[in-house]
Structures are given as structure tokens and as C-alpha cells.
Image (cartoon, rainbow, N blue to C red):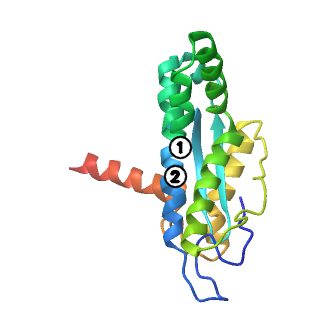
Amino acid sequence: SRCVRRAFLCGEDALTGRNFDHRKSWVVDKLAALTEIFALDLCAYAVMSSHFHLVVRLDPDSPRAWADEDVLLRYGRLFRSPVEDARKLPPDKQKERVATFRSRLQSLSWFMRCLNESIARRANQEDRCTGRFWEGRFRSQPLLDEGALLTCMSYVDLNPVRAGLAESLEGSEFTSIQQRLWEVARQVQGERQ
């Protein structure tokens, strides 16, 4: 997803001199929250100054095993009112509504909607403005085999280094590679103790 305005998603805006680096944590935090709710795995991410990259693996099988109550609880973390309304419906209508929620919780489009809309609203509020924040709908490319997945994850992991925002993978902040490297370092440190 790419930002549409001159005001950056994150980073230093040369035009105004304002720094928006604090917004990077908004994206990372929202990703963490949404991956607990939706049926997908976040494989890689990199938050850049005017856009971000994600590599996700959809998991359409898991939601089939979720109990209806689990679906309502998950969806309620996103949208409280529709779940409250669904709970008041007769059982057959409630089943239909739960099926709709279950479908949305395995949809990349709904995941991106929840991510991008929340970031846009928060940034617009901070900037005291209204209007479009994102260039348009996110772009996606299906990765059909492990080679494509590895290539894409490498592209995302190396993006901040190639863009000159970091000198190393360890120093590329707000990326999944830095997070993975820290986790490995903590494990190694734990084994040494």
C-alpha cells in the first residue's frame, strides 16, 4: 500500500520538515493485532516512508474449525456493533451472519481494509485533515511456490537496505527481518545462560 499525499506515512517530509517516524509503530502494532484475529500468517513486512510491503499466507482451512462463538469474538474485536446486532438475531439468521463474518476473517481484502482504514483515520486525525490517505486499493501478487515466496520475502527484507534507510538487516527498523534476527539472538542468548 502506498500513501497518496505529500505528508508521508512515516519518515521525514522534506517539504514540511515534519517527522512521521512514530507512525511506523502504528503499522507494526496494527499488524500484530490483526494477525491474531484473521486467518493468515504474516511472513514478512517492511514499513517504508511512503508505503509498506507485506507478505502474507492465507489460511482458509482454520476458520472452518472455529466455533461460531469464536468467530463472533474475533469479529467483535474489529467491529463491535455488528456482532452485538448478530447476537440478537434468531438462530438461523445468526448462522448466516456468522458465515459472513467467517468469510471476512479469511479475506485478504478485509484484512487490508482493517489495516489501511485504521492507519488512514489515525493519520488524518493527527494531520487535522480529511480525504484519501492511500493511493488506492492495495496491490497484490500471488506467490505460487516456495521459490516465489523466498524471493518475495528477500525483496521485502532487503528493501530498507536497498533504499538507503538502513546499512544492515539488523539495523532496518520496523521490518520482519529485524524482528526475526532479534528473536534468534534472544534464543541463542537464552541457550548460553
* 87 to the left or right of 163: left
User: In the rendered image of this protein, does residue 70 appear above or below residue 107?
Assistant: above
For the N terminus, give its image quadrant.
bottom right
What is the residue that sits farthest to the left in this orientation?
193
Is the residue under label 2 in contact with that under label 1 (CB below 8 Å)? yes
For disc 2, the neighbor class at 10 Å (few under 14, some 14 to 19, many from 20) is: some
141 or 1, nearer to the observer: 1
Residue at mark 1 to residue at mark 2: CA–CA distance = 6 Å
Q: Nearer the viewer, residue 143 or 51?
A: 51
- Name which residue type carries label 2: Lys
Estimate the x, y position of residue 187 in percent, counting from the top left.
34, 48
- Residue 119 is situated, as x and y percent measured from the top left of the image, at 59, 59
Residue drawn where x is 53% and y is 43% of the image: 34
Question: Which three-letter amino acid code belongs to the residue tagged 1?
Answer: Leu
**In the drawing, does residue 134 fall left or right of residue 186?**
right
Front residue (pair 174, 33): 33
Q: Secondary structure at mark 2?
A: helix
Q: What is the number of the mark on residue 102?
A: none
**Secondary structure under badge 1?**
helix
Horizontal relation, residue 9 to residue 139: left or right: left
| Residue that carries the numbered disc 2 in the rendered image | 30
Name the residue tied to disc 1: 34
The picture places residue 50, in percent across and down from the top left corner, at 67, 70
Residue shown at 71% from the left, 50% from the top: 151
Q: Position of residue 42 (x, y in %)?
A: 57, 44
Q: Is residue 172 visible?
A: no
Question: Which of the 4 image quadrants contains residue 5?
Answer: bottom right
Residue plotted at (77% across, 53% down): 137
Q: Residue furthest top?
A: 92
Can the viewer see residue 141 in this picture?
Answer: yes
